[in-house]
Structure formats: structure tokens, C-alpha cells
Image (cartoon, rainbow, N blue to C red):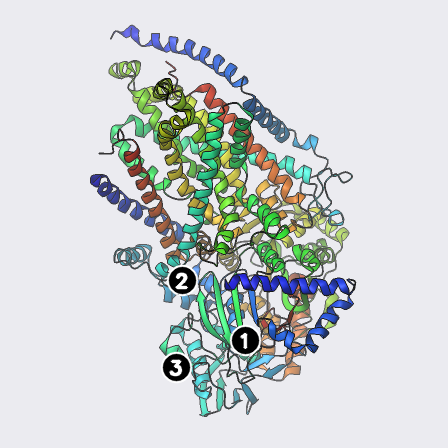
Amino acid sequence: MTTTVQPVPHQENRKKREKYYVTTLKRLFSNKLAIAGLVIVVLQVLMAIFAPLITPYDPVAQNLMKSELPVFSEGHWLGTDNYGRDVWSRIVYGARISLVVGVVAVSLGLIGGVTLGLLGGYYRKLDSPIMRIVDLLFSFPGILLAMLIIAILGTSLINVAIAISIWSIPTCARIVRGSVLSVKEKEYIMAMRSMGASDLRIMVKHILPNITAPIIVFATMRMATAILSTAALSFLGLGAQPPTPEWGAMISQGQDFMWSAPHLTIVPGIAIMLTVFAFNVLGDGLRDALDPNMNID
Amino acid sequence: MKKLNKNWLVLFVLGFVVMLLAACGGSTIPEEAVTEASEEGVEAAEDVDQEIVYAATSDAVGLSPIMTNDSVSSNAISQIYETLFVRNPETMEIEPKLAESYETPDDKTWVIHLKEGITFQDGTPFNAEAVKYTFDKLRDPATAAPRASLLEPVESVNVIDENTVEIKTKYPYGPMLAALSHTNASIVSPTADQAQDLMQQPVGTGPFQFVEWTQGESLVLEDNPDYWGGAPELDKVTFKVVPEISTAISMLQTGEVDFIDGLPSDQIDRIRSLDNVEVLEKPGTPVYYLNFNFSKEMNQDPEFRKAVAAAINRDAFVENLNGLGVRSDSVIGPKVFGYTEEADNGGQAYDPELAKQLVEENGYGDQTIKMLVANRDNYMQMAEIAQAQLAEAGFDVAIETMEWGTFLDATAAGEYDLTFLGWSNVTGDGSELLYPNFHSDNIGASNRSQYSNPEFDELVNASRVTVDQDARKQALIEANQLLLDETATVVMNHGVVTAATADDVQGLKLDPNGQWFLENVTRE
Amino acid sequence: MFALVVRRFFQLLFLLLGISFLVFSSMYIAPGDPAAIIAGPTAAESDIEAIRDNLGLNEPFLAQYGRYLSNAVQGDLGYSYQTKQPVWEAIMIRFPNTLKLAIASMIVAVIIGIIAGLVSALRQNSLWDVSATTFALAGISIPNFWLGAVLILVFAVNLEWLPVGGLSSPWYTLDGVKELILPAITLGTASAAMIARMARSSMLEVIRADYVRTARAKGVKEGSVIWIHTLKNAMIPIITVIGLNFGFLLGGTIITEKVFAINGVGRLMIDAIAARDFPMVQGSVLLVAALFVIVNLAVDIIYTYIDPRISYD
């Protein structure tokens, strides 16, 4: 191996990667379901960003005189809840919460999972202890783990995000570790190692970019799980603080009115379903398009 | 097969009732008609299984009156055991139950004569020895009874003769009879307590005796044929655990259970609309209030408390309870000893303009107020409505919900600004409300507001150490008014105790404290 | 095989030790005093203190944990703080219900999942495929607490076909089966969806594989191609999902048991956490974790039978 070896595969790699991304996008856009998912996700992001502009009411403003209005009422096309709050406004602001909690939870989970996975996959010595810890986390039912964490930290959305992130660490760590193991033995990595490039540099600059595909797919799918889990924890009374318009909390509260005002459970239920559905099909589409089995180099 | 038969029977009964209703044209008359018809036809009543299934939102913790202090346990316990005295739910007077009569030779001595010829369900005779055994066990620190403090003023319990017991107190103790009518002061069989764990296998003198308990699932009782008051009509009582109240309501609708209680105001309209269900509602002893934390500087400012009280529209809140709340400013409610009508409007009235003005002038909106809320019962509803109204007046209030266990700790330690509390007041006595919640003796424990006012303490003490009931009442009225004058708390509502039964259930006795008795219940 | 079991057994012990420490310390750190909960809001401070002493809660952390551990090693999981009942007994009363529920929903999940997966793989891109795929995606996306409430509303309350909740009859009776249907669907739908997806993609892979083509070319009948070759090979990823989902199901029982008033371990667990009933939390978490590990061990062993190429030694 000569000193000239290093930059060459790197540059070539980059070109290949660009081309790879273009083909990926093309493939993604040929998948109708994935486009539907993407559209819903984009719409939701827009809704979250422009919430104040598209909602006619303050999502927490009560009007006890106008409580439990059905859908398509005048001025409230999705009706009002038991405190007379506008359901549409709450749904729109709820999109913000779901997205933010989802993104925070997934990012935290990725940081933990990717770190553990990289270390475990890269250093043979660390592999076994790290994987035992991962096993430990894995054998807890996720919701139970979250409940214990919330018991310690207290009920709030931030703590829910932390709890959910911890429960996505083991899966993420396993996926990353597997990918690292397969990339690690590639020639150019071996070459760089023999040339004395630092481990950190190799991991961050060379291994990580090569395992982005499975990470992106995992993150997208995990958004779906995170949103669902946030709702479940709020349902158990362990999540959003009232009057926060969190969807799961809305269902939980609306359940008491299932007979007199079914829209209070059905509307947020559909909102959760649509969002989770969107992230799932998008994740599916991305996986098919990226094809983690494909050799990027 | 047995279950199947029962289902058919229930269907048949339901069908029968529906037919009758239809025949009578669906006005309000048919209900009476049904009752009359079945009262006339005695044979008809005998065809129905004399059984009842009650849906409890949680399992009983245990079946020993000494070792438990939760509402489901006390509902089971009060069918199995009995107390020396009971408060008559209609007159609110205390009457003897296992006791025959009592006298107070001096203000620190209570001599209680017991009814004769009563035996426990295991055959042990009920006598002075059993009473002494029970009370000594309850008081013994080694027992670690949750409600040991109920008999804290007691110096000694002495057996005078077979049917007379004497209780000596450390100081004159006014609410003694109320304490003795508390479920936790139920008399247990000494032989049984020594032979077995009453938590699992209870033995009392009550109308129903224990059959079996599958924890978390169901508890079965049967009639006590030798009950001193005459064997009850019901042959079998089942407590079934149904944690979700909406599931319980559905089960009541489909006939899987016959009886539920503690109906939520959110769903009361649905329950009222069910054809085969009868709803019992009556004003009760519970009180729910907004609590200031007096260890926080802002809460010590009387103007601040006044602003909070003026900002909260309690009339609108009570309206939102769909009839399951009674509106009054008074801390001591209409069904509690020590109440006076004048206190109903004795506190700071709802006045949004005043509230806004006070907030503006004093800059109360500049700091975030932490409103701590337990995530159960009606507290979330109270918090959501109050938070919105306080925000309207210019306060900046952030709700923080907590699990019950953490909440108890955090409020006892004073880690909050505002919170909501409730007090079901099992004994129906105002002393039992004001002393634990507002007397400075209990700061750090049940006095979660850390309210401390020597003048108030004095009045509450007076209500506790006098045996003269009129003097007690006067002291309580004054203490109550003091709380209102100082806006030491803002009462949201007084409770309405509720139950809903299948419409063939007759004779259910519902106490103003929410407890109930099945002794006289029949199915028709 | 024997070596595998022995090794896993030691891993399990290590795991249980780790979990017990994790749970014990988190319950210890968590705010909330079990004694205050037992005493209730009406209690005086002296009442609470007496209960604390009685439960040994005033001892230092390591003394409490050490005592717990040494008892646990001798097979004594302690007594519930709340009910004073032996923890093992309390769990064993409820465990059959959870197991019934988990197995019933697994059956629902496998049947629906494999049929949907099979149909969509064999009739790729047909209307069948599209609807099965959509079902699968919708299944994963439905919050199960919501699904449970809707099912009760429709089938139990309005149509009165099935009971609202509870598991009171033996599972082999008609009533027992009826009681299990709604909770099993509620809990099993998400797993059914996952299995359907997994089944579809692995079936597609296998169908395209050379040996199936060869078998077809050889003139083996279509039916037996599917059943013998394809299904057998597609079983591996499906069994993986089942193994992983079993843990998911055990977690999911927490919500399902609450909605359907089922007296199971999941509900025992949330109640115990809320009441800070340390021994009960410990006992039930350890049981669930052990079960998860054992199920996955069983899955691994099944692998080696289905596919002799897989080895764990």
C-alpha cells in the first residue's frame, strides 16, 4: 500500500455516493405509497410550522358554554371538546408536539445506539460487554422501561422523549453493529488502519457514512414507533401535561365521552394513525430504495 | 354452563322489563309499576338469583380493618365487619350499632355497653374482650396500622365486665364517637386474628361472610345466616375488579355487573340514559378544594390568594360536573358536622375584574405558578378549568401532573405552589376535616398547605377536646369562617356520592361518605 | 444444543442480576414513599414512620438490596408491601391470564399475518396484495388502546356479541373463548401486521430463489412448491418476528389488560409501580424478562431444526 491509496477510494466513493443518492431518490419517487407517506409527512411538518396561521382558535382556550360541539359545527369544523376547546386547533398544535417529541426521542436514541453500535462493532474487546448491556435493555418490555424511567424523572413530555429514546437504543445498536462489522473488513478501511489513521477518524469519516442507509430507514420507522409510544404513555397519564394538546392525551380524555361525543377519540385516533402510517410507508419506501444490502462502495 | 344460564336469565329479565316498559308507554310511571308488580308477586322474586356483582376500579388491598385504609377495602370490610357506632346517613346523627348505649362519667372516660348475644362469623362471642383486643391491636406501634392515629387520644381500653368496656383518653376527646364509627375501628374476632391473617381471611360480625378472594380478579362473600340483625336477602356478593370505569359502565349496560359507584361526571349522562340502569345520587361529605402552599412567599400574601379565588368561576365548574357537585364556599360541607348555611357564600366571590386588577397592580403574572395535580379522580378536570381561568385573569400557571404516590410525597414536603386536594371524610365530622388538613400539628404530613394560624389551631382544639356537641359545633363554625376570611383555601365543590345499579336492585343504602351497605338489598 | 442451553442459562442469570439491580435502584431513586401510599392521605406522620420501620425502608440501600438478593437466591421473592401477600403467589394468580392473552393474540397474529403475507406474496401487485399491504401498515399504525375502546363499543356494547371484559371462564369453554376474542385482536393486530410484512418479503425472496424455480421447472405442482419449499424457508424470519414480538406482546398486555379488565401480570406491574411496591415490581419484571429470554432461546433452538445450516456453537 502506498500513500496515494488513501484519497483515491475516498473521492471515488463520493462520486459513487452522489450517483447512488440520485438513483435512490428516483426509486423512491416511483413508489406510490412512499410518495403518499412523504406528502403526509411534509403536510404535517407544514402544519406544525404554520400552526398559528391555520388555526382559528387558541388550542388551550376554553369556552365552557360551547362544549362537546359535534364535527362540522359552525366555526368549529372538527367540533369542540368537553371544555369547549377547538379540536382542529388542538390537532394542528398536536402535530407540533408529536413531531418534536418524535424527533427528540429518535435523535437521542440514535446518538446512544450509534455510539454503542460503532464501539461494539469496531472494538472486539468492547463488543461482548456492550452487547450484554444491549441484551439487558432488550429484555425489558419497552413500555415498562419507559414507566420506570418516568417514575424516576417525573411526568413530562421531555421525560417521555428520553424514555422512548432509551428503549430504541438496543435495536439501533444491533443494526449499527451489524453494519459496522460488514464494513469494517473492507479493503480501504483496512488500508487506512494500517496507515495509522486514528480510530475516531475512521469511524466517523469512513464507516459512518457507509452505514447511513440502515440508520435512515431505522430512524424513519422509529419516528412511527415514537409517536405511537408517546400517545400510549399519555394515555396511561404519564406523558403530556394538560392542557397540552397531545394526541394520545386527547384520546385518553375523549374516551370518557365516547358515547356522547365520539369525535373526541376518533379524530385524534385518525391523526395518529395517518402520521404513523405515513412514517411507516416512507420508511418502507426508503428501505426498498436504499436497499441496505446494496454495496455502496 | 352456569354462566350461560345466568346470562340467559339476565336477558330474560331484561326482556321482561323492556316489555313491561313498552306496555306502559315509556313514561315515568312504569318504574313504579314494575316495583309494585314484583312486590305483589312474591314468587316472582324467588325466581331471581339473590346475587349481586359489584365492579370496583381497583382490588381491595386487604380485608383487615386494622391494616388497610383505602376505599375499596373499606367497602368490602363494612359488609363483613361492624363498628360500635354508625352515623345515620339520613339524620347524620351517630347511633349505636354493636354498642347498646354509652355514658361519659367524666370528660376523659367513655363507658360503652355492648349488645349481648352477638357472635362473630367463626362462632367467637362478641364481647368487651374483643373490643379491647381490636383497639389495642390498632393502637400498638408494632402493628404499624395505617390509621393508628384514629385512636391516638386513647390512654387505655379496659374490660369492665363481659359486655361493658371503658375507654380512657389522655385528654377530653370530642370526636370519639365519630372515630369509633370509622370503618378502621371495626371490631375483629380475636380468635380469628390469632389463628389466621385477616387480610386474606376476614372474620367479623357483619351480615356477609368471606368465601374466597382471587386477588386482582374477584372477591366473593355470602350471607351470614346467623347475623344478629337477621340474615340478609342476598345469597352472594361478588366484588369484581374492573380498572377502567368506561369498561365498568359497559359491563353494567350489558348486565355483566349489577352495580358500580363513584360515577364520573364526564360519563354521568351516558349512565343516566341507560334503560336498564338506576342511578343513585345524593349530596355527600367529600370536599374538593384548591390548596395554597403557605411555605411559599407569594401564597402568604392575602391579596394574592384573594386574586386566585376571584379568578376561579366555581359556579361554572360545578355546572361542568353535570349535577355531581354541590357549590358552596364553606370548607365544612352541608353533610358534615360543623356546617352552617351562612358559610355558603362566606368566601371571596368570583370576580374576574377584581382578579385582573389585583394581578395587574401587584405583578402576579410575572412569575410562573406551579400547579401540581394528581393524575386521578376529578383533579385533572379541576386543574384544567382553573388553569384556563387563572390564565384569563393574567396569572401564568403551569400544570404538572404526578402519579398518586409521588404526589403524596411532594405535597407533604411542600414542593408546589398550588394544588387540588380532596377529603372524603368517612366520619362526617368537621374536626376530622380541619384538624388533619389545616392544623399546625400536621405540617409535614396531612396538612399539605402548611397553613399555620394559632387562632385557628385554638378553635380546632376546642372542637376536639370538648365533649359538649353544641360547643364543638360553634368552634367548628368559627374555625371554618376563619379559613374563608383568610382565603386560606378555595373550595371547588362538595361531593355528590353516586352509584348505579341494574334496575332490579332494591334497597341499596348509600352513605354520604360514599360507602354503601348491602344488608337490605334484594333482586326483584 | 446442550452447550447452547447451558450458555444461555448463565447469560440469563447474569441478565436477571442486572435487571434486579436496575429495577431495585430505580425504584429506590424514584420519588414516592411506599409507606405514605399505604397510609393514605389521611395518615399522621407517626403512622407513616411506623410503616416505614415495619417494611425496613429506613435501612441503607445496599442492606435492602443485599437482603432482597439473598432471599431471592433462596427462592423467596418477598412479600408485597401493599397486600402483604407473597410476591410469587400474587404473580402466579395472574400469570395464567397474561399467558392466555399473549398466546391467544399470538395465534390471531400468526393466522392473520401469515395468510395476509402469503396472499400478497403469491398475488403480487394484485388488488389482494394492495389491500393486504394496506391492512398491514394500518395495523401497525393503530394505537391499541384506541382499537380496544372502539372494539368494545362496537362488538360488546352495541352488538352485544362478546363480553366487555374480564377473563372468568376457563379458556376451553365457549365463554372463555369469547372473552379472549376482543383482547386478542386488540393486542394481536400490530403483531399480525408485522408478521404479514415479514412473511410477504421473505416469501417473495424465496419464490424468486433458484431452487423454487428449479422445482417449478421440474414440474412439481404449484401447490406443493409453495407449501414445501417456500413456506418452510420463509419460516425463519417469521419465527424471528414471533420471538421478538412475544416480548412486545408481554409489554402490550399492560395496556390491553387495563382496557379489558383482565387480571394479569401487566396490570400488576403498573399498579405496583404506582404504589412503589418494590418487591412486587421486582418480581414481575424479573418474570417477564426471564420469559422473554426463554422464548428467544426456544426460537433459536427451533431455527436449528428448521435450518440445519444455522448453528450456535
**On the image, numbered disc 3 is attached to which residue?**
B191
Secondary structure under tag 3 reads helix
- The residue that appears at 47% across and 58% down in the rendered structure is C169
Secondary structure under tag 1 reads loop
- The residue that appears at 24% across and 15% down in the rendered structure is A194
On whether disc 3 and disc 1 are found on a single subunit, the reply is: yes
> Which residue is the extreme one toward the bottom?
B161
Question: From mark 3 to mark 1, how far is it between C-alphas?
Answer: 22 Å
In-image side of B8 versus C302 (left or right) = right
C97 or A84: nearer the viewer:
C97
**On the image, numbered disc 1 is attached to which residue?**
B182
Secondary structure under tag 2 reads loop
Whole-percent x and y of residue A98?
56, 36
- Amino acid at the residue labelled 1: His
Neighbor class of circle 3 (other Cα within 10 Å; few <14, some 14-19, many 20+) is: some
Mark 3 belongs to which subunit?
B
Mark 2 belongs to which subunit?
C
Residue B264 vs C118, above or below: the answer is below
Neighbor class of circle 2 (other Cα within 10 Å; few <14, some 14-19, many 20+) is: many
- Amino acid at the residue labelled 3: Thr
**The label number, if any, that marks residue C81 in the structure image:** 2
C180 or B322: nearer the viewer:
C180
